[in-house]
Image: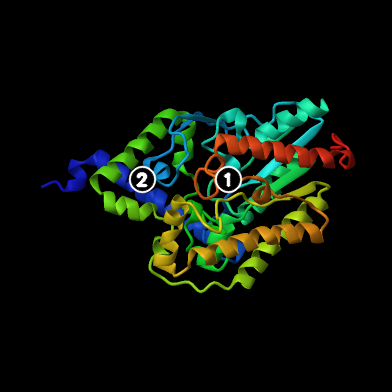
Amino acid sequence: MSNWFEKNPRKTFVLFLALLLFGATLITEKALSLKAHTKKSGIIRVIRLREHAPRFAGRITPSDDELRMADSLVPKEYPFRTDSEGFIEPALIHQHPDLTLVFLGGSTTACYYVDEDKRFPALVGRLLEKDTKLKVNSCNSGVGGNFSLHSLDILLNKVIPLKPDLVIMMHNINDLAVLMYAKSYWSKDFKKGHTSPIVELHPKIIDTRLLVDYLIPNLYLELKSMEKWLRHTLRPKKAASQEDELRDFRGKKITLDQNFLVQEFKMNEQLFINICRARNITPVLMTMENRLKENPDPLIMQLTKPLEKDQGISYQEYKEIFDRFNQAIREVGAANRVLVIDLARKVPQEKEYIYDLVHFTTRGSELAARVIKEALQQQLPSLKPGRN
């Protein structure tokens, strides 16, 4: 009687060949490890660059949750495009500019729900061109969820090669969040923005998502949207908990060490200045606009109420530490003789200019652009534009 191997000669050959290749692989690995006198793990570690996908072109619309958390956000589609470097368009519009600006920050800098030509980083460039007759490139590198450590990473790895004349950075609320909850910029537990600039393990040597995104980007986005819709439809409670960036901190009371938080924030602001100056770039700091008034609007009380319920932080305590972060920006700027553009004092704390706690309406972005343009224009004589 013939056995299985005799009855299945092709399968036997394939099995033999697979075992042979597996054995050869093990022998080769062993030989290489003996040659190197070490055992290699094969683990790849990377630092993520928190940027927008290059060459993206589409439209973004405020979600129902975002509209519920705003009182002057216009529910419509907003064009959103990025260039080959991941900067929000329009950005590098001149091949040989006389002046190059780069704006670093989070969603307050990105201005997602502002008309494309009215986002203040781009608008500042156009206003400066009109007044100075210079060719100005003005790049928006804002990314929602980014805090100052992300911006330092972007500055080192993406901005410096542009040889910009000025780099303008605005941070506050995201830095406050990561320091308040996680007590460190390098925490792996904090989910703000779903990534951290710390060193981490790369899950795969080859990420097939990159290939899919390159070959069929539109279909890929539609499939991702469908996946999200199905997740919310079929298991809404689980989906909501997965997207809750503060889920690990819910119900945990926080004791605010304001001096510690401010000192940590100041060190990153100082590092930004030091890096810029080491590369002959003029650094500029900006305070963050907000609606944290002494007598807040009903929406703002609603948005900050969970802080008191979950973490035991009152509105007044939160306002105080937010204001101290803005004051820290002013102090670091003054100590280093760096221009500070004080949007917190220049932009009215009203819904016509800010649609929630800190995000600009189109009208607010236009006002910010005029304020920034006027401040930078006074700085230009000392810059020698086009020196790079």
Q: Secondary structure at mark 2?
A: helix
Which corner quadrant holds the C terminus? top right
Q: State the residue at coordinates (82%, 30%).
A: 98
Measuring from the top left, give residue 51's x and y in whole percent: 58, 43
Residue 186 found in image quarter: bottom right
Query: Where does label 1 land, which residue?
Result: 108
Disc 2 packing (10 Å; few <14; some 14–19; many ≥20): few
Q: Nearer the viewer, residue 92 or 2?
A: 92
Disc 1 packing (10 Å; few <14; some 14–19; many ≥20): many
Residue 142 found in image quarter: top right
User: Horizontally, is 146 left or right of 133 in the view?
Assistant: left
Task: Identify which amino acid the numbered label 1 is placed on.
Answer: Thr
Q: State the residue at coordinates (10%, 47%).
A: 1
Task: Identify which amino acid the numbered label 2 is placed on.
Answer: Leu
Q: Nearer the viewer, residue 347 or 222?
A: 347
Q: CA distance from mark 1 to mark 2?
A: 59 Å
Q: As displayed, is residue 42 above or below residue 283?
A: below
Q: Secondary structure at mark 1?
A: helix
Query: Where does label 2 land, which residue?
Result: 17
Q: Which numbered disc, 1 or 2, marks the residue that appears first in the sequence?
A: 2
Callout in the foreground (1, 2):
1
